[in-house]
Amino acid sequence: MTERSKPDDARVERRAKGLTAEEQENGVDDAEALAEAVLEESDLRAADRTRTPDGVVEHRRSEDTVDLTEE
């Protein structure tokens, strides 16, 4: 999938029918437009694993996220 291509209609339809609980709770005016936008971003991220909205990629190890000291 190129950066400008759109997800196929079947994927958009499946995603629109499977709104997340948060999306359902907040209400969605156009489920298909939301689904298309979500899938486009997902496809771009899958194609370029270093692509992020702010351009920052964090590389952490599990030991960087918790305190491993014993008490």
Image (cartoon, grey):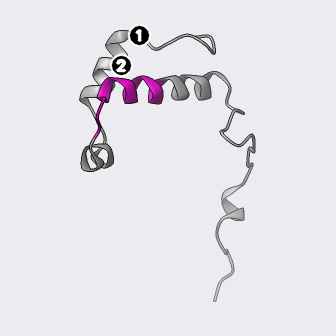
Residue positioned 69% across, 80% down in the render = 69
Q: Secondary structure at mark 2?
A: helix
**Residue that label 2 marks:** 12
Q: Position of residue 10 (x, y in %)?
A: 32, 12
- Looking at the image, is 41 positioned above or below residue 63? above
* Quadrant in the picture for the C terminus: bottom right
> Disc 2 vs disc 1: Cβ atoms closer than 8 Å?
yes
Residue positioned 74% across, 44% down in the render = 57
Residue neighbourhood size for the residue with mark 2, other residues' Cα within 10 Å, grouped as few (<14), some (14–19), many (≥20): many
Q: Amino acid at mark 1?
A: Asp
Region rendered in magenta: 28-39
**Residue that label 1 marks:** 8
- Looking at the image, is 64 positioned above or below residue 4? below
The quarter of the picture where residue 27 lies is: top left
Q: Position of residue 45 (x, y in %)?
A: 61, 29
Which residue lies most toward the bottom here? 71
Q: Report, in whole angstroms, how far the alpha carbon at label 2 lies from the one at label 1.
A: 6 Å
Q: Main secondary structure of the magenta part?
A: helix
Residue positioned 24% across, 27% down in the render = 17
* Quadrant in the picture for the N terminus: top right
The answer to if 38 sits in the magenta stretch is yes
- Residues 28 and 55: in front is 28
Q: Amino acid at mark 2?
A: Val
Q: Position of residue 58 (x, y in %)?
A: 73, 49
Which residue lies most toward the front here? 29
Q: Position of residue 61 (x, y in %)?
A: 71, 55
